[in-house]
Amino acid sequence: MTKKDESPRKHKTSTPQSEIIPVTPGVYYPRNRSFNHCHRETYRTKYVRAVLKNGDINVEKFYSHRINFFTNWFVSMVEARWRWTLLNFFLAFTGNWFSFGLIYWVIALSHGDLTEEHLPPNQMKSNWTPCIENIYGLTSTFLFSVEVHTTVAYGKRSITLNCPDAISAMCLQCICSSIFQAFMVGILFAKLTRPKARTQTILFSRHAIVSLRDDKLCIIFRVGDMRKSRILNIKASMYVVRLDTNFQYLECNEQIELKTYMDSCESSFFLWPVSVVHVIDEHSPLYEMSAADLICGHLEILAVFEGIIESTGQPVQARSSYGESDIIWGHRFAPMVSYDEVRKMYAVDFSKLSETEQVDTPLCSAIEYESIMRVVNSVHLSDQCLLEEQDNLR
């Protein structure tokens, strides 16, 4: 081996793989070991969200008392997928028809209508009047049950006056079938008119950002609606949830609403995507949180968007969440609304909903930034006073 090969390799040092940590764009990480260790442990620990990115609530509830089975079944059918609801409808209707068909079969069997000499081909010879005409067995009674429920009435099977039990069973089936069908129609109507599918067209930005607005630190996310039909009386809210963190200004499993406003948007007029802004001031639970605290902490910010669908008048609620890995410090959202000169209309590019641009933003907390700005303003004011005094002396 030559000297040229030996000399540089003696003094080369490589960073261990355990020291390499993922870097979020727009955030400066101090080069101290405690911060890197804190961030590394936070990153390796899998964070479980209370609300998933698609809006589903990741909470399982346990009850100490018994739940009403019918109420739980009705809600389950409304919230279930269409294939399970239709399968349940098929099984429920078939079970109802078979149950009353079995009742008619028992009545005919007890009356003696199913013996060989009393079957329909031999009824003229034996001069026999059955409870239900043209009944041969269980299949015939099942078809008669279907005819009673659906009022098809083919004209071959009908109840005679010699069997009050069959008449009572038919009246009972008419009452039960009407109630049964009303519930099924209610499930179908509730499933068709529920606004859950409408929430799929309401999009949230992939990241929330922290940047300066009007010389104050703000946390911002963007939300937009892809459908042409409007949503009225919109309201956007933010909630901070602390699940596992060492910060003393947030209680464990506490949910706090953040004061928000929508940038350049009235609540009754939702034209294009809006930015939902929370100013981190002295009333905010994030007032003492810096960029380093955000990376090391386990907190989650819930984003809720509510409104009324213009076409149906039903309320709609869309949800999303932002964990500490979804919050970018020192960015702002890129413009996504432009004017099309050719078509003479505004164009909204939803591919830029989550697009951000890096801007200069202090990494300290809001309380530290305000104290620094007070000192800077006081020094600036004293300099101005000194200049004025010097001008007066001249």
Image (spheres, rainbow, N blue to C red):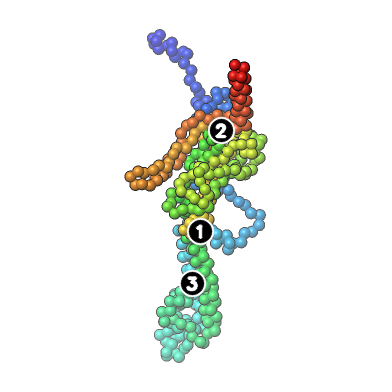
Q: Position of residue 318 (x, y in %)?
A: 51, 49
Distance Cα–Cα, label 2 vs label 3? 72 Å
Whichever of callouts 2 and 3 sits on the residue coming sooner in the sequence is 3
Amino acid marked by disc 1: Gly
The one nearer the camera, 151 or 376, is 376
Amino acid marked by disc 3: Trp
> Residue at the spot x=47%, y=13% of the render?
11
The one nearer the camera, 215 or 140, is 215
Residue 283 visible at all: yes
Q: Disc 3 marks which residue?
A: 97
Identify the image quadrant of residue 245. top right
> Residue at the spot x=53%, y=30% of the render?
361
Q: What element carries label 3?
A: helix
Q: Disc 1 marks which residue?
A: 313
Q: Do the residues labelled 1 and 2 touch (CB within 8 Å)?
A: no
Q: Disc 2 marks which residue?
A: 215
Is disc 3 surrounded by few (<14), some (14 to 19) or many (20+) residues within 10 Å? many
Q: In this view, does 25 lie above or below 203?
A: above
Q: What element carries label 2?
A: loop
> Residue at the spot x=36%, y=44% of the render?
340
Q: Position of residue 152 (x, y in %)?
A: 43, 76
Query: Considering the image in quadrants, where does the C terminus appear?
Result: top right
Residue 322 visible at all: no
- The mark lying in front, picked from 1 and 3, is 1
Residue located farthest toward the top when viewing the structure as drawn: 3
Whichever of callouts 1 and 2 sits on the residue coming sooner in the sequence is 2
